[in-house]
Amino acid sequence: MNHFSKFSLIALSFFINTVNAQNVATNQNFDDVDSLFGWVFSNQSSPLGETNWFQGNGSLLQAQEGESNSFIAANYRNTEGNPDTSSTICNYLIMPELGNLASVSFYTRSRIAANNFNVYPDRLYLVYSPTGEINTGNCTDDFGDFSETLLVVNPNLSQAISSPEGYPLTQWNQFTSEINGNGRVAFVYYVEDAGFYGANSNYIGIDTVEWTLAALPQSIFNVWEN
């Protein structure tokens, strides 16, 4: 083995051990939703509304951290309201391909309606595609490639003012799920009887999404040691 190869192996071994010594974490704070790299928006609501995921509005909610509008949001207009038929919001916010994920955490909240006393319940799913494929379902039949549900915020569409019974309304709450895989994660804003004429759905924000990469397996180091 020449000196260059020895040096390369030493450097690579040092790098791997450094990565393995502590999990690698990073995050997305949604300072500029229009410039998100690798994120996919897919609104499968029925009937389809006029909004998708969009930059937060600091006059409605203050961001969990950073500038007042530095969060991502969706609202009841994800579906077209219809007084004669039921409307369903089914809107995917798909995270980028990130590698071998250990966990994902995020903050979310909704708000009391403008009249200050009505609660139109919201619901958010965190789902996982083990294959990394991102074909979406329609929420009614399935979630497409996102076949594993990691957690649900307000699964029963409760109108409770305080979490955990309902969707957080007065402050940002953090939620965390273990992943341990190379697939892809998505948020799904999924609300039945939604829209302008529905009994459910209002406005949700998501902020400070953090993900942690799993430590490299010991087998990698065994190869270099041999």
Image (spheres, rainbow, N blue to C red):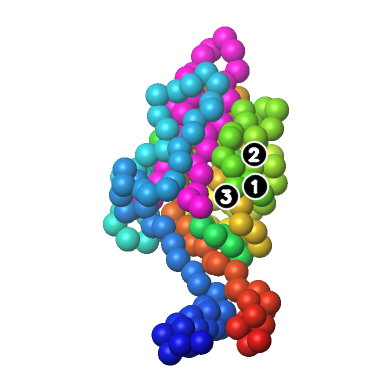
User: Is 79 above or below relative to 148?
Assistant: above
2 vs 3, front mark: 2
Judging depth in this view, the residue of 1 and 100 nearest the camera is: 1
Whole-percent x, y for residue 103 in the image: 60, 63
Residues rendered magenta in the picture: 70-97
Does 79 appear in magenta? yes
- For label 2, the residue is 145
Q: Residue at x 57, y 50 (%)?
A: 185
Quick one: label 3, few (<14), some, or many (20+) residues within 10 Å?
many
Under mark 3, the amino acid is Val
Alpha-carbon span between mark 1 and mark 3: 11 Å
Q: Residue at x 55, y 67 (%)?
A: 213
Whole-percent x, y for residue 61 in the image: 38, 48
Q: Residue at x 67, y 27 (%)?
A: 140
Dot 3: what SS? strand
Kindly indicate whether the residue at mark 2 contacts the one at mark 1 (C-beta within 8 angstroms). yes
Label of residue 131 in the image? 1
1 vs 2, front mark: 1
Does residue 78 appear in the picture of this structure?
yes
| Residue at the top extreme, as displayed | 84
Mark 2 or mark 3, earlier in chain = 2
- Report the number of numbered marks: 3
Q: Residue at x 64, y 39 (%)?
A: 145
Whole-percent x, y for residue 73 in the image: 42, 42
Q: Quadrant of the C terminus?
A: bottom right
- For label 3, the residue is 185
